[in-house]
Every structure is written in C-alpha cells, then in structure tokens.
Image: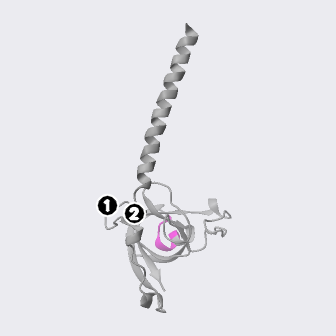
Amino acid sequence: MRLKSQRQMAMAGTGIFAAISLALGAGLMQDRAQPDVVKLGDGRASVETMPVSEIEPVPAQLAASPSPTASAIGEGEASFYGSELAGNRTANGEIFDPEKLTAAHRTLPLGSRLRVTNSRNGDSVVVRVNDRGPYHGNRVIDLSYAAAREIGLIRSGTGRVNLALLVS
C-alpha cells in the first residue's frame, strides 16, 4: 500500500512540473514575439521604451563634428564596483581596472562614451562603456571606482544620475 501512494505522489509531482514548464515556455515564446526594446532606467520618469527599429541614426553632420555633442538618454540609479573585480575580464575583453573611467551598461554599444552627472551635486564625469550590467535591482549603470569617486558616489554607494551619450 505504501509503494502505491509513493507512486501516486511521484506522478502528481511530475504532472505539476510539466504544467509549470509548459506555462513558462508559453510565456517565453510570447515575449519573443515582441520586437527588441531599449529601456533605460526604471521607466517612471523621462525614460521611454521603444522598439530598436524606431531609433533614428545619428545625422552625418553630427557624426563628423570635431567637438563631442551630448545627447541625453535618460536617468536612473547608478552604483559602482571596486577593487574586488580588478583583474577580471570585461565584456569587451579588456582587464578591469578600477582606476580607469569606465562603466557597465546593459544595452549601449561597447566603446560608447557617456557623460554621467550626479543629480544631487551636479558633478559629472565622462566614461567609456566596456562591460555589461548592472544586473542588480533597477540600476541603469555601474561605474568604476574612479568614476564614482569623481562624481561623489563613494560614500553613499549609489545615487541618482543623468546619462548623456557623447557623439564626436
């Protein structure tokens, strides 16, 4: 009798697992039907979501200008990562150095240059995107230790920032 109830429990568990797997698979397939979307920040303030195909390319006269122009791309929470990751490879293959002015961003092309401005004190720094992330909470950018020090984020650990893409 005991063996029969164990078999029944195993069959019920297998059935539940299969149902959950099917539901998750259907949800993932539905997500793939939507176009690629670029979303910066937590989406509450001035950041809008839009399909990648609707983003206009940079005009040729801006791309050829000798002095960099900044194009605001959003705002959100920034954090920094310090010496614990020093020596590890970043997404573009270089060795991470916390004393360089670099950053991690989820979607911007590697090599992009950004002006990051601390909303609280107005201090800004220009960083180069060389890694992917952040993958914690609703943060939009991870700065190197040197970049965070430049804009005054070391003591608080995180802070509200404005991001502007530099086009040169």
Query: In terms of secondary structure, where does tag 2 sit?
Result: loop
Percent of width and height locating residue 64: 48, 91
For the residues labelled 2 and 1, the Cα–Cα distance comes to 8 Å
Percent of width and height locating residue 89: 66, 64
Residue 151 part of the magenta segment: yes
**Is 112 located above or below residue 156 in the figure?**
below
Residue 132 part of the magenta segment: no
Q: Is residue 138 left or right of residue 149?
A: left
Residue lying farthest to the left in this orientation: 45
**Callouts 2 and 1 close, C-beta under 8 Å:** yes
Q: Is residue 23 visible?
A: yes
* Label ID, residue 36: none
Percent of width and height locating residue 100: 60, 74
Q: Label 2 neighbourhood size at 10 Å, few (<14), some (14-19), many (20+)?
A: many
Percent of width and height locating residue 156: 46, 61
Q: Is residue 85 left or right of residue 14?
A: right
Q: Indicate the quadrant containing the N terminus: top left, top right, bottom left or bottom right.
A: top right
Depth check, front residue: 57 or 146? 57
Q: Which residue occupies 47% across, 70% down?
A: 152
List the residue tagged with mark 1. Answer: 44
Depth check, front residue: 155 or 117? 117
Q: Which residues are magenta?
A: 148-154
Task: Name the kind of residue labelled 1 in the image.
Answer: Arg
**Is 27 located above or below residue 49 in the figure?**
above
Q: Which residue occupies 49% across, 70% down?
A: 108
Residue lying farthest to the top in this orientation: 1
* Label ID, residue 41: 2
Q: Is residue 121 visible?
A: no
Task: Name the kind of residue labelled 2 in the image.
Answer: Gly
